[in-house]
Amino acid sequence: MDVIAADAIGKLPDRNAAEAVQRVQGVAVARYHGEADAATVRGTPFAWTSTMFNGSRLPSANVTGGRNSVLDAVPSEMIQYVQVAKALTPDMEGDAIGGSINFITVPLLQKDN
């Protein structure tokens, strides 16, 4: 498993989650109008990579029937760190054949009343 922290993400001009995770070795991204919008592990089809936020599986926003998640709507400032698993382990879902990308977000600040 590889991990990239918010410190490393903040040093580079990445605007969204897909651009931030492309810095991890073995991760490739698809681009739409020049901006990264989906990520895959080890060159497998995008549908074979499980994408999660805080351990919860992201649903697909693909209208053509694919299972890949669109990540260009998630700003990189929301990410505390990213975990990239490049091999399927027994605790992962069955559709994580290519690997798994888990985005851990920054905790929200709570107001004192």
Image: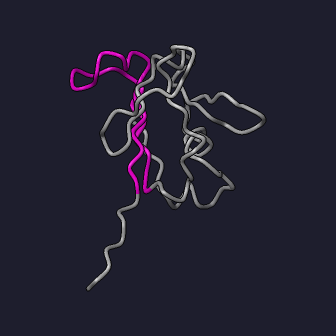
Can you give x and y, in whole percent of width and height, for residue 91 in the image? 21, 26
Task: From the viewer's perspective, tell me whether residue 45 is left or right of residue 111.
Answer: right
Which residue is depicted at the point 51% across and 16% down? Answer: 66
Task: From the viewer's perspective, tell me whether residue 51 is left or right of residue 18.
Answer: left
Q: Nearer the viewer, residue 61 or 7?
A: 61
Task: Work out which quarter of the rendered image holds the C terminus and state it.
Answer: bottom left
Quadrant of residue 59 within the rendered picture = top left
Q: Nearer the viewer, residue 1 or 69?
A: 69
Can you give x and y, in whole percent of width and height, for residue 55 in the image? 30, 40
Furthest-right residue in this view: 33
Which residue is depicted at the point 48% across and 57% down? Answer: 78
Task: From the viewer's perspective, tell me whether residue 112 is left or right of residue 80.
Answer: left
40 versus 66 height, above or below: below
The magenta stretch spans residue 99: yes
Furthest-left residue in this view: 91
Can you give x and y, in whole percent of width and height, for residue 98 in the image? 44, 18
Quadrant of residue 51 within the rendered picture = top left
Snapshot colouring: one colour
Which residue is depicted at the point 56% across and 30% down? Answer: 39
The magenta stretch spans residue 93: yes
Furthest-bottom residue in this view: 113
Task: From the viewer's perspective, tell me whether residue 76 is left or right of residue 88.
Answer: right
Task: Work out which quarter of the rendered image holds the N terminus and state it.
Answer: top left
Quadrant of residue 18 within the rendered picture = top right
Can you give x and y, in whole percent of width and height, for residue 67 in the image? 46, 19
**Start-end of magenta stretch:** 80-105
Which residue is depicted at the point 45% across and 16% down? Answer: 48
109 versus 37 height, above or below: below
Count of numbered badges drawn on the protein:
0
